Image (tube, rainbow, N blue to C red):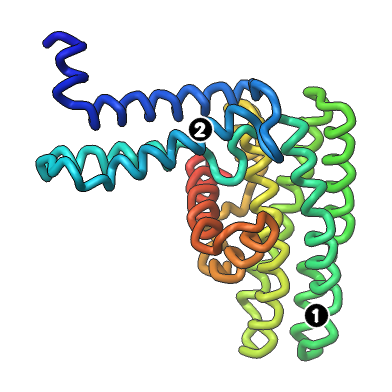
Amino acid sequence: MNPITNIWEHPRTSAAGLLIAVVTIAGVLSQQGLTLGKAGAGTVVSLISALATALLGLLARDPDTAPSSGSTAKLGVWAMIALLVPLPWIQGCTGKSMAQDIVNWTPALQSAVATVDATAALLAPADATVFAAATSGFDAASNLLVAQANAYLANPSAATLAQLQTQVVTLQQQVNSALLAAAKITNPTSQQQALTSIQAVATIVTTILSLVQSVSSKAQVARMAAASGVKLAAVQPYLNSAQAAQAVAAHYGEPVSQAREQIARADEAAMQAGL
């Protein structure tokens, strides 16, 4: 079929294809660190991608031309694919922006770790001992993670990235192990208090892990996964998804529903990578 005729006879499908191509190309440019300049608080590439995705969503829902149900379904599927192309909260993420984002999480991380430190006093004596042992490394590991993020922000080299990768996995492993230990506490009240405080740290660490993963090569992610003895899948039953979504939404100033979807995609990416 003549391409011009095809475009004329199927304008919505052709427009959808063009928008999907724009979103895909923008995603590739973002992953390569090409921004095409600043646009407000973001980049020109991320703005173009967001606009194309929004237009694709409107096109897929446009009822005025009464297309066949099969055509509508196909457009809906392609719109969903385009929405799932960008990684959560890291579209247009470069090494420096990732490091800055980690640094921006510093107050929340330090507050969550301080809450963990104070939680032991609220638990039954026997449970407090178990809890304190499980979380004893949080302070040092979180401080080192922040220091490594600052170091990478100042000098985004392969060496500083490797140190950041090592440190985020170290803290992730401590948090995951602590969750498993807290889940074994038999006193229901103590267990709930212990899990709630650790979950707050886990949300931030998982977010940071996703950010670091976004600027890491496949080989680097494989090394991170090899160092992850306690996988995310093992601790997911002890995570509070509602609490995590609230924290992410508040940090990024976005709807909770959007944060929930971002967390789900980040978790899926981490588990697929073996983290």
Residue visible at 53% across and 51% down? 262
Spot occupied by residue 51 in the image (x, y as percentages of width and height):
48, 37
Relative to 163, say whether 206 is above or below.
below
The residue lying toward the viewer, choosing from 64 and 220, is: 64
Spot occupied by residue 256 in the image (x, y as percentages of width and height):
55, 64
Image quarter where the C terminus lies is top right
Residue visible at 58% across and 64% down? 245
The residue lying toward the viewer, choosing from 20 and 10, is: 10
Mark 1 burial class by Cα count in 10 Å: few <14, some 14-19, many 20+ = some
- Whichever of labels 2 and 1 marks the residue nearer the N terminus, that label is 2
The reply to whether residue 176 is visible in this rendering is: no
In the picture, the disc for residue 49 is 2
Q: Quadrant of residue 123?
A: bottom right
Q: Kindly state the secondary structure of the residue where label 2 is placed.
A: helix
Q: Residue furthest front?
A: 64
Residue visible at 35% across and 24% down? 18
Q: Kindly state the secondary structure of the residue where label 1 is placed.
A: helix
